[in-house]
Amino acid sequence: MKLKQSFWSDVLSVLISVLAQGNAITNPQAILRYALPIDNEPIRKVQDAIEDISNHLRGKRWPPIAKDVKTASFVLTVRSDQIIEGVPSDRQPQAESILESVKTEISELQEAVKNKDKEQVWLTRRAILDNIGKIEALMVEGFPFDVPAEYANLPQLKGRATVKIETTKGDLMVVVDGYNAPINGGNFVDLVKRGFYDGLPFIDLEDSFAIQTGNPPGKEEGFIDPETGEYRSIPIEVLVRGEEVPIYGATLEEMGIYLPDLVLPFNAYGAVALARPSLDPNGGSSQFFFFKFDSELTPPGFNLMDGRYSVFGYLVDGKQTLAELTKKDKIISAEVVDGLDNLVQPKNG
């Protein structure tokens, strides 16, 4: 099911011509933090302020950086109780401990900003955001929605999982987001668990802004379920921010939804998405691709890919390895290194 080269040419031309839509988030870790299904305004306000530092740090614009740090410090001072109240009671002691670390790190960040120590600001900012992400993860309770019953025969990922992919160029680490793409994510994690991807080659796509894999040897173009003997079809699955449930079965363009604000967008280098035949939104199976096009050349924000293909995860480590992969390379092995307990198999499986 190698996607048609002519389609990718069309994608490329549109990507280059589309105007940037605001200050899009291109960091995969930040996208994953904002994608967590939580509703706690104080912790998001702290996160917003610390995330915003990156918009000013490269240009060494110290006054707005100092303002961001001041905002985060103020919220932590007056609204810490509301942050902790957003965590289930049995996890609150853990959250309190992490929050104390954040407060200490904020003080260190203030000192680094005062000294205009750019490198230390980067390092401390990263540590703060890592801890904020841990607190936000502790806030998640249960699964945010019911997957439509028509997909009950497919594996589902009710949470997140981390997959390590060893390639002939090096390792790739991928976080699979089942909170927002449980079917696409569940299918991928299930196939990794089965060893399906071990030994499979990569496919170069036109202009090197994506690389695909997952095509098994032989005449089949996807996974044949040994229980049923049938091709496992996986639907497109796209969650628009503000909606409760993803859209299934049709592209957003077919639904008349344009310039969508997606929870899992194609903003980040290394976005992982389900490949499919160009005319069948529900014809995906085992093949997936990494979005490689440079965000500095691709207008960040809404582009032709959003809503036409479903992202189910992001590369969080191995960017240089991904950049070097070609059709001469292959996957040596893939394994789920965390979150396998979030995989829910269908009752008939």
Image (cartoon, grey):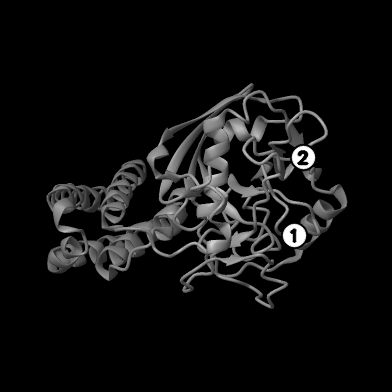
Q: Position of residue 222 (x, y in %)?
A: 72, 40
Q: Is residue 268 above or below residue 167?
A: below
What amino acid does circle 2 point to?
Answer: Glu
Q: Position of residue 260 (x, y in %)?
A: 60, 71
Question: Tag 2, which secondary structure?
Answer: loop
Q: Is residue 37 above or below residue 175?
A: below
- Mark seen at residue 16: 1
Which image quarter is the N terminus in? top right
Mark positioned earlier in the residue sequence (2 or 1): 1
Q: Position of residue 39 (x, y in %)?
A: 32, 68
Residue found at the very far bottom of the displayed protein: 256
How crowded pointer 1 is (Cα within 10 Å; few <14, some 14-19, many 20+) is rated as: few
Q: Position of residue 184 (x, y in %)?
A: 57, 51
Q: Residue at x 50, y 48 (%)?
A: 346
In the picture of the structure, the residue carrying the numbered disc 2 is 221
Q: Is residue 286 visible?
A: yes
Give the number of the mark in front: 2 or 1.
2
